Amino acid sequence: METLEAVSALDAKRAAEAQMARAVTCPPWRHAVFGLLFGGLIASVAFNTVGQYAILAVILCCIPLIIRSDRKRMGMFINGYRRGKTRVVALGILAVELSLYGVAVHRALDRGDHTTPLALALAGVLIGIAGSYLWQHVFVREMSA
């Protein structure tokens, strides 16, 4: 009897994971917002202090709105730093984006160059979008396995 209960529990777990994998598919605008948040962070260093604070305030205000939107759309919010292969993807995205931010800060503050941070911001948007799609793909694959 215990074996049947264990098999049944594993089947229920697999079914719940498969259902979660189907629910987590995000619309394209959600990936774009993710990329725009990183791009905004990188671009912020091209502006004066007031502009930087304004951009950072918008970014920080967007985070709870995204969480609320995900919960409303999917019934849940999945933390990007969850265990598994998705954490590797999330940390990779973060490393690349923060590297771009570091270069933007160096160019803007040390060199007075306010054009390069904007170009790096565009790269940050594209990398963020691609990274978001990759994260979703890895998550769905993990849940479907």
Image (spheres, rainbow, N blue to C red):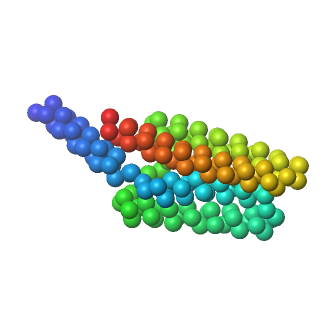
Residue in the image at 80% along x and 54% along y:
115
Residue 75 % position (x, y): 35, 60
**Image height of 64 relative to 130, above or below:** below
Is residue 8 visible to us here?
Answer: yes
Is residue 77 visible to us here?
Answer: no
Residue in the image at 20% along x and 35% along y:
6
Residue 4 occupies which quadrant of the picture?
top left
Q: How many marks?
A: 0
In the rendered image, the residue lying farthest to the right is 111
Residue 124 % position (x, y): 65, 49
In the rendered image, the residue lying farthest to the left is 1
**Most foreground residue, 133 or 90:** 133
**Image height of 53 relative to 38, above or below:** below
* Quadrant of the rendering where the C terminus is positioned: top left
Residue 51 % position (x, y): 76, 67
Left or right: 19 in relation to 65: left
Residue 143 occupies which quadrant of the picture?
top left
Residue 128 % position (x, y): 58, 48
Residue in the image at 10% along x and 33% along y:
1
Left or right: 111 in relation to 1: right
